[in-house]
Amino acid sequence: LKSCTVPAMFAGRAARLPPEVNRILYVRNLPYKITNVELYDIFGKYGSVRQIRKGSEAETKGTAFVIYDDIYDAKSAMEQLSGFNVAGRYLVLLYYNPAKMAVKMDTERRREELALLRKKFNVDDK
């Protein structure tokens, strides 16, 4: 049998990825005034970025979702940019976890329903 070597550019791709790794990164602790162009400059160095969604509401400011075309590019960005200093703030990167986000959304929806019921039945929050 002939031995086969993997080209250097694909060497990291031979390893099995952990299950939490995916193409979508959730980024926290961004400077509020960072622009989309700056985000693309920072994250584009690690591969082709399909989309960046920056938080604009009061509770989502300073956060963004960065979606890469390739899972290995997302993994590389995660490894290189976790703790990266941008305008005096250290970035916090997490892999997007749909199950965790669904629970969070469900909790927020229930809080809103509860607030409406309290208002409807004139029940004080205290």
Image (cartoon, rainbow, N blue to C red):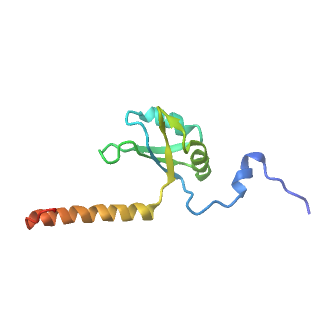
Residue at 60% x, 50% y is 75
Left or right: 91 in relation to 16: left
Residue at 85% x, 56% y is 4
Indicate whether 67 appears above or below 21: above
The answer to whether any part of residue 47 appears in the image is no
Count all numbered tags in the image, as a single digit: 0
Residue placed most toward the observer, 67 or 82:
82
Indicate whether 87 appears above or below 1: above
Left or right: 40 in relation to 1: left
Farthest front residue in view: 126
Residue at 43% x, 35% y is 36
Residue 91: image x %, image y %?
A: 49, 42
Farthest right residue in view: 1
Query: Could you tell me which quadrant the N terminus lies in?
Result: bottom right
Residue 42: image x %, image y %?
A: 53, 36
Residue at 22% x, 61% y is 112
The answer to whether any part of residue 115 appears in the image is yes
Residue placed most toward the observer, 96 or 23:
96
Residue 70: image x %, image y %?
A: 58, 50
Query: Could you tell me which quadrant the C terminus lies in?
Result: bottom left
Residue placed most toward the observer, 81 or 89:
89
Left or right: 10 in relation to 124: right
Residue 33: image x %, image y %?
A: 38, 33
